[in-house]
Amino acid sequence: MIDLGPHAAFIWASYAIYAVVLGGVIGWLVWDGARIKARLADLEARGVSRRSRAAKET
C-alpha cells in the first residue's frame, strides 16, 4: 500500500467525494436525458413536430 503520510485521510476523503459527485452528475444526466426523450415522445404523439425534421422533408 502507498504511504500517504499524515494527509491520507484527507486524500481518501477527497477521492470519495469526487466519486460521489461524479456519480451524481452522471446519474442526473441519464435521468434528465430520459425525461427529455419522454417529453419529446409525448409532443410527437400529440402531433407537434420538430422544425429540423420538417426542413429535412422539404
Image: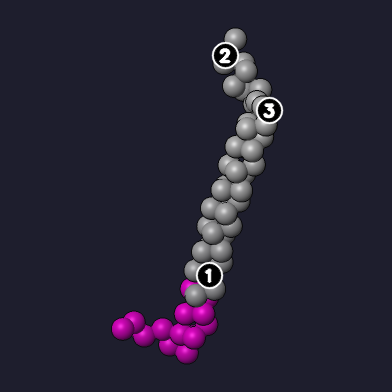
Total numbered badges shown on the rendered structure: 3
Position of 35 relative to 12 (above/below):
above
Q: Where, quadrant-wise, is the N terminus in this rendering?
A: bottom left
Disc 2 residue type (three-letter): Glu
Would residue 3 be found to the left or right of residue 20 on screen?
left
Q: What residue is rendered at 57% in x and 13% in y? A: 57
Q: Horizontal and vertical percent for residue 44?
A: 63, 31
Q: State the SS at label 2.
A: helix
C-alpha span from label 3 to label 2: 15 Å
Q: State the SS at label 1.
A: helix
Name the foreground residue: 7 vs 12. 12
Label placed on residue 20: 1
Query: Within the image, what quadrant is residue 41 found in?
Result: top right
Disc 3 residue type (three-letter): Val
Q: State the SS at label 3.
A: loop
- N-terminal of the two: label 1 or label 3? 1
Which portion, as a residue range, is magenta? 1-15
Q: Residues within 10 Å of mark 3 (few under 14, many from 20)?
A: few
Query: Within the image, what quadrant is residue 27 found in?
Result: bottom right
Whether the magenta-drawn stretch holds residue 7 is answered as yes
Q: Horizontal and vertical percent for residue 12?
A: 47, 80
- N-terminal of the two: label 1 or label 2? 1
Label placed on residue 48: 3
Position of 17 relative to 10 (above/below):
above
C-alpha span from label 1 to label 3: 39 Å
Q: Residues within 10 Å of mark 1 (few under 14, many from 20)?
A: few
Label placed on residue 57: 2
